[in-house]
């Protein structure tokens, strides 16, 4: 990757984050957070959480206790996780895959071999059963390749984790890594681009877009709508 390609990819990343991640969060995420039916409320805890946050359990306090963790936590993380394959395909042409259990295929910029990669968003995003499922997909791909006379080694089947550090990997990922390489964060982006610091460049680009967004008005609107619905529900 030369400097011109790097600049172009980072420009694409900026557009993707603004148009796909931020827009989905500000519009769809806020809409869902404003509707009581979209919450799975624990009846034992919601008043406690409102009191813990605001010192009372009136409708607005309850709304804030529900909306804040949704919009500032689970909503944006879910949105990002659902779009990681779209992100890679938007940034790099020809990475798509039709192989079962494989999200992208690319030529490793470090060892020059073709990699068959399942994408994950962060270091704690699989469970015990996922490990065996991923191993099964990878083993099946290798066996089929051998039947067809293709040279695919075990270390060519990888898991690529978009963000995080090696020491943050869950025990499930470590189990996978014993058989198939797990690339995470800076290491993952290094293998894709050949640039050791590309991961940091990408974080900085997303950070630049973040500075364009002031969500206080949208947050206030969302809380207000939910508070009104909670008040109407309590009064009926």
Image: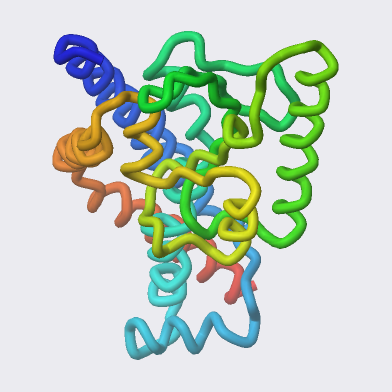
Please state which of residues 34 and 91 is positioned toward the viewer in this rendering: 91
Q: Is residue 205 above or below residue 180?
A: above
x, y percent for residue 161: 47, 44
x, y percent for residue 174: 57, 59
Residue at the image point whose x is 55% and y is 25% from the top: 115
x, y percent for residue 6: 21, 18
x, y percent for residue 233: 61, 69
Q: Is residue 155 above or below residue 111?
A: below
Quick one: quadrant of the N terminus? Answer: top left
Q: Is residue 64 left or right of residue 134?
A: left
Q: Is residue 179 above or below residue 151?
A: below
Quick one: quadrant of the C terminus? Answer: bottom right
Q: In this view, does 103 lie to the left or right of 193?
A: right
Pick out the residue farthest to the right: 147
Residue at the image point whose x is 76% and y is 19% from the top: 145
What scheme was used to colour the molecule?
A: rainbow
Residue at the image point whose x is 58% and y is 36% from the top: 155
Q: Locate residue 11: give its quadrant.
A: top left
Please state which of residues 178 and 36 is positioned toward the viewer in this rendering: 178
Residue at the image point whose x is 16% and y is 10% from the top: 4
């Amino acid at each position: 990757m030369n400097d011109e390609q790097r600049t172009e990819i980072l420009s694409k990343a900026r557009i993707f984050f603004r148009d796909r991640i931020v827009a989905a969060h500000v519009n769809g995420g806020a809409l869902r957070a404003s509707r009581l039916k979209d919450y799975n409320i624990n009846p034992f805890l919601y008043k406690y959480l409102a009191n813990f946050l605001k010192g009372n359990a009136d409708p607005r306090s309850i709304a804030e206790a529900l909306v804040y963790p949704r919009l500032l936590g689970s909503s944006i993380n879910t949105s990002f996780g659902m779009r990681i394959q779209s992100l890679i395909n938007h940034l790099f042409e020809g990475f798509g895959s039709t192989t079962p259990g494989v999200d992208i295929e690319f030529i490793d910029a470090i060892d020059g071999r073709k990699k068959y990669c399942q994408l994950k968003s962060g270091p704690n995003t699989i469970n015990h059963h996922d490990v065996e499922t991923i191993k099964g997909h990878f083993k099946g791909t290798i066996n089929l390749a051998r039947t067809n006379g293709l040279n695919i080694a075990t270390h060519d089947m990888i898991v690529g984790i978009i963000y995080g550090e090696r020491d943050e990997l869950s025990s499930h990922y470590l189990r996978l890594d014993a058989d198939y390489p797990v690339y995470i964060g800076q290491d993952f982006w290094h293998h894709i681009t050949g640039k050791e610091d590309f991961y940091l460049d990408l974080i900085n680009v997303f950070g630049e877009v973040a500075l364009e967004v002031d969500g206080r008005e949208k947050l206030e609107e969302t809380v207000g709508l939910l508070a009104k619905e909670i008040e109407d529900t309590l009064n009926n």
